[in-house]
Image (tube, grey):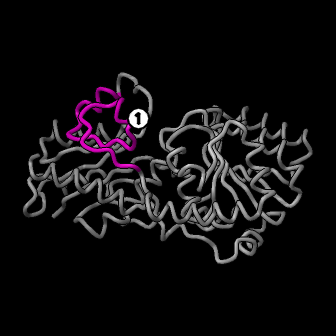
Amino acid sequence: MTELIVTNFNPNFTGVSATAAGVVRVQAGRYDMALADVALPGCPAPVSRATARQLSRAPAPGRPFVIWHVRRNPEMRAALWARDVLRLPVRIVFTSAAQRRHSAWPRWLISRMDAVIATTDAAAGFVPNVRAVVPHGVDCDRFAPAPDRRAAWAATGYPGARGVATIGRIRPEKGTDRFVEAMIEALPRHPDTTALVIGRAGAADRAFLDRLKAQVAAAGLSERLLFTGEIGADALCALMPALSLIVQLPRYEGYGMVPLEGMASGVPFVASDAGHYAEFSDGGRAGIVTAEAAGAVSALLTDAGRLDAMARAAREVAVARHSITREADGIGVVYEALWAGR
């Protein structure tokens, strides 16, 4: 018998996938549940969409219905089909992180949800039927500091004595060009440092990527500012604690998990004022939110004592305030209220 279906229909491992995976790893020990469609690292093996519907026909004893927790438009559509067309005993919970007005189609889909969980107060202002504001959390066991950061960096095989990185899709919205420009300014001051652009460019952004590579080559930094392509979730988890600094400079971000994953790994961040980054920074203890990224990066790489103190604070803040267990607890309150008819 099943209490909970968590959907993951995107074959690419995105930020949404990462947040779902962290929660599912906790929920798997709390509920009779199934992950539907695409596998997530460290999570139970997924079932097909058809099997998810079949499992929803007979809820677990004591449960009036099966909750489907969805996070994307196609997943909302599938859950609505199960509930409203097939008339299965299903209720739908949607997590919304977007801090801007949704377009017409997702607005309609969201209006049909039984409960909405917003990840921030700002996100809650753009969606109806918000039952709770539950910030995303990070798995502080999976992401943990390296015993020796310099040795960990050396083991990666990348050049230099230490590394900084930006992580995510390569496109203007994510500010990849801002990172490249900041590194072109900062790296000449720090000859022992290598910068990584970790992520892939979609077909529409290939020309953007080519321009960035040409810009790096023109600056003579092709051996020190590297485009790694996409790195798998487990490999990224291993790489993160080897870094000295995370630099995320998006023009828009709904929430932004990379700084949190870095913090749990004992890595502070420099970021633009987007997503939930200002909250993560804890007043500058764990990260710096600034419009002058190159200067902030250079200042931290120059001051080893400050960088080490921020690394320790980053881990402390992640564990105390942003753990994945806290997120799973908050989501669980919404589930229980639905099952109780509240």
The image shows residue 73, relative to residue 17, as above or below, that is above
Above/below status of 232 relative to 149: above
Residue sitting at x 86%, y 49% = 222
- Going by the picture, which residue comes out furthest to the bottom? 147
Q: How many badges with numbers are in the image?
A: 1
State the residue position of label 1.
Answer: 122
Q: Is residue 286 magenta?
A: no
Asked whether, in this view, residue 304 is left or right of residue 45, the answer is right
Q: Is residue 74 left or right of residue 177?
A: left
Relative image position of residue 291 (x, y in whole percent): 68, 36
Mark 1 crowdedness (10 Å alpha carbons): few <14, some 14-19, many ≥20: some
Residue 113 included in the magenta stretch of the image: yes
Q: 113 left or right of 302? A: left
Nearest the eye: 183 or 155 = 183
Query: Residue 154, image x and y in percent?
Result: 77, 71
Q: Position of residue 283 (x, y in %)?
A: 56, 49
Quarter of the picture containing the N terminus is bottom left
Q: Is residue 94 above or below residue 336?
A: above
Quarter of the image for residue 170 reads: top right
Say which element carries label 1. helix
Q: Residue at x 22, y 32 (%)?
A: 112
* Whole-percent x, y for residue 148 in the image: 69, 76
* Residue at position x 61%, y 52% in the image: 287
Could you tell me the amino acid type at mark 1?
Ala
290 or 226: nearer the viewer:
290
Q: Which residue range is magenta in the image?
A: 106-135
